[in-house]
Image: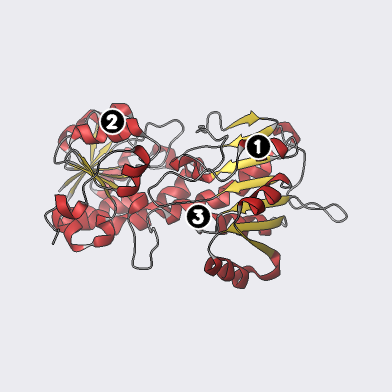
Amino acid sequence: MLIGVPKEIKTHEYRVGMVPSSVREVIHHGHTVLVETGAGLGIGFDDQAYIAAGARIAKTAAEIFEKTEMVVKVKEPQASEYKKLRRGQILFTYLHLAPDPEQTKGLIDSGCTAIAYETVTNSRGGLPLLAPMSEVAGRMSIQVGAHCLEKGAGGTGILLGGVPGVAPAKVVIIGGGVSGTHAARMAMGMEAQVVIIERSLDRLKQLDEQFGSRLTTVYSTVDAIESYVVDADLVIGAVLVPGAAAPRLVTHKMIKKMRPGSVVVDIAIDQGGCFETSKPTTHAQPTYVVDNIIHYCVANMPGAVPRTSTFALNNATLPFILALANKGYKKALADDVHLRNGLNVHEGKLTYQAVAEALKMPYVTAEKLLGLAA
C-alpha cells in the first residue's frame, strides 16, 4: 500500500503522523511511504531522516492526497485538506466530529473512509489511541494551569504547592478517566490540594486505592460540582463520552461565583468542552477571560510538546496502520471489531452513532456498510 504523511497545518501543530522508525517498520512489511517535505521538522526530523528510513519525499500536500491510498495524520483535516480526499482513500487520524458539522459534511462529501483514533477501542473497554494524548493533556493541564495562576498571566498569584505556612492551591478535576488521573498525579506531585469528581463508584474506589489520603474523591452531582468548582483555584475539565459531544457540567453561573483570577482548563474542548463558557483556542492565543476567570481551551494541547506526543501516539497507532496496510481496510475492519469502532465515515455515510446523535444526522452501522451485518 502507498501511505501518505502530510505536514500538519493546524496553528502551532508540530506533531506528525509517522516518525522515521514507524516509516521503516511499515516499509519493512512491503509498503511504500510518501512524506511531505518538512513534515517532521517540528519534532527534529528532517527529510533526510525519512529518506534514511526508506520514505519518498513529496514536495506538496496535494501530491500526498492525490497519490496515496491511505493518509495518516494527527489532527482532523482542515477544509483545504478534506476537499482533497477522495472515494476509496483511507484517512486515519483524530477526527472529533461531534462538535464539527462542517468537517463531518466535508468527509461525507469526499466519499473517503475516515477512521478516527479517538473511537478505536480495546478488549478492556478503553480507547488505546486516545489514551496517549489524554495522558499528555492531563499532565499538561496542571503545568499550564499553574502558569495561568501566576499574576503575570492574569491569575490570582497563587503557587500551586504553596510553601510552609501558606496553604497550597485547591485543584478540582472533573472526570477520573485517563486524563483526569494523570492531571491528579501531576497536581499531587506539585503538592496541591486535589479533588477528583467522578460519577463511577468503581472508578472512585480505584482512585482511592491508588492514591489514598493524598486525593479527595467525590461522587459527581450537580451540587458537588458547584460546591467544589466555586471554591477552586484551578478546575480541570476531563470529562469524556467516547465520540460524543462532552456534557456541559460547569455552568456560566458557577463560573461567575469563582474567585477572580481563578483558572479553568478544558481538556474536553476537542469534543465541544465541558464548561458552558468554553470555546476552542490555539497555542498562539491559548487563553481568554470570562467574568475574571482565565480559560485555557486549546484544542490540541499535546501539540505544545510535539516530540513526546508524537512518539507516544506512534507507539499506539503503528499496529493499526500495519493492519490496514497489510490487509486492506475491508478485511482489517472485518477482522477487528475494535478497529471497526473507529470507523466514523465511509463512502458518503456517517457510521458512528454518537456523532450522528450529536449532529442530528442519519447514520448507517459500519457492519451494514461493510457487508458484515447478520
The tag on residue 291 is none
The tag on residue 81 is 2
For this orientation, the residue located farthest to the right is 165
Give the alpha-carbon distance from disc 3 to disc 2, as whole Å.
28 Å
Dot placed on the residue nearer the N-terminal end, 1 or 2? 2
| Coloring applied to the structure | secondary structure
Question: Is any atom of residue 355 visible in this view?
Answer: yes
Dot placed on the residue nearer the N-terminal end, 3 or 2? 2
What residue is disc 1 on?
A: 253
Q: Which residue is drawn at 17% across and 32% down?
A: 66
Q: Which residue is drawn at 63% across and 41% down?
A: 264
Residue 260 spot, x, y in % from top left: 74, 35
Q: Is residue 53 left or right of residue 277?
A: left
Query: Which residue occupies the foreground of this view, 337 or 8?
Result: 337
Query: Which residue occupies the foreground of this view, 126 or 256?
Result: 256
Please rate how many residues cluster around mark 3, counting C-alpha atoms within 10 Å: few if below 14, some from 14 to 19, many from 20.
many
Query: Which residue occupies the foreground of this view, 4 or 274?
Result: 274
What residue is disc 3 on?
A: 135
